[in-house]
Structure formats: C-alpha cells, structure tokens
Amino acid sequence: MRIRIILFAFLLFSVMPIMQDASAHALFNSAESTIGNNRIQIATVPEIPVINEKCKIRIHVTDLDLKDVQRFTMGMRIFFNDEQVDGIPPQSHETGYWEFDYVFKRQGNHIFRVDLYDSDGKVITHTFNMSTQSPFVYVFTYVIGSGAVGAAVIVGYIYLPKRFKKLRAKF
C-alpha cells in the first residue's frame, strides 16, 4: 500500500513542472477584455444573479502590466435582446475599482458595453456577456453533486473492503 502512495506522489510531483500557469477559481459570470493600453475585468456577486434581486457588479481596470489604473472615466450600456434596457452615464473613479449594485429584470443573457474614456476623451468600448439565473444552474449543481457522490461511492467500494479485511485479520 505504501508503495502505491509513494508511486502516486512521485507521478503527481513529476507532472507538476509541466503546469506553466495556475490561477484561482474564475467566477462563472466574469470576463476580461484588453483593448489598447487597458485591461478590464467584470464580475457579478453572486456568480449567477437572481432576477429582481440586488447583486453587485464589480469592475477592475488595470494597465497592461496589471497595475491599477488611477483616475479613469467609465460609463456603461446594458442590452437585452439587442435592446438597451439600462445605462450608467460616464463617471470618474479614483482607483482601479468600480463596484455598484444592480438588479436584473429579465432572465437570460445581458450584454454589458463598458465605455472607458482615455485621457484624450476617446471612447474604448469593451463588451461582456453576463447571464442571470436559469434552469441550467440547477442541472449544473445536480450534476456536480452527483459526480462527487459517485466518486465517493467508488473510492469507498475500492478501499473499504481492504480495510475491513485488515481489521478482521487483527482480531
């Protein structure tokens, strides 16, 4: 048994150098876009907003070196089925973050067109897809939960009989 664990650990750590890049869990309803000299990240909290309930929209603006942009002006237009349903006029922000509350009125995919104004007054538009809660969320949650339970059953089926045999042999 120890040989298997040592072999597994060796294989695991010998494969590790192949992994070049690792990152934290990306939110489901998040995206990023780089145009010109700026990179914009957008996300919702909770990850999948519920219709007619308040959620937070978080925006992070950085330069190409991933340093926060100081003093930027940004506005936003929100579309649903190619029709503008909401908008936020341009506002100045002192740090690289902008966070605000928003309530989605319709279920489905919304297009967020984020307008970033550069120092010359030129508008650079970043486009993001943001989704609201749908039946897919329940199916996705069920599938993930079922997979976890199935994996636990398989591991238990493989390893528990061996443990019982060892315990019986001791008595």
Image: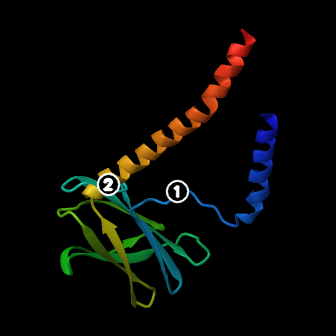
Determine the CA span between mark 2 and mark 1. Answer: 17 Å
Would residue 25 be found to the left or right of residue 80 on screen?
A: right
Label number found at residue 55 = none
Q: Nearer the viewer, residue 66 or 118?
A: 66
Q: Secondary structure at mark 2?
A: helix
For badge 2, the amino acid type reads Val
At 77% across and 62% down in the image, what residue appears?
17
On the image, the x and y values in percent for residue 57 come to: 35, 62
At 37% across and 73% down in the image, what residue appears?
92
**Please, is residue 33 above or below residue 156 in the view?**
below
Mark 2 vs 1: CB contact within 8 A: no
At 74% across and 58% down in the image, what residue appears?
16
**Residue picked out by circle 2:** 137
For badge 1, the amino acid type reads His
Circle 1 Cα neighbour tier, 10 Å, few/some/many (<14 / 14–19 / ≥20): few
Residue 83, quarter of picture: bottom left
Would residue 147 be found to the left or right of residue 171 on screen?
A: left
Residue 159, quarter of picture: top right
At 61% across and 27% down in the image, what residue appears?
160
Q: Nearer the viewer, residue 115 or 13?
A: 13
Q: Secondary structure at mark 1?
A: loop
Label number found at residue 25 = 1
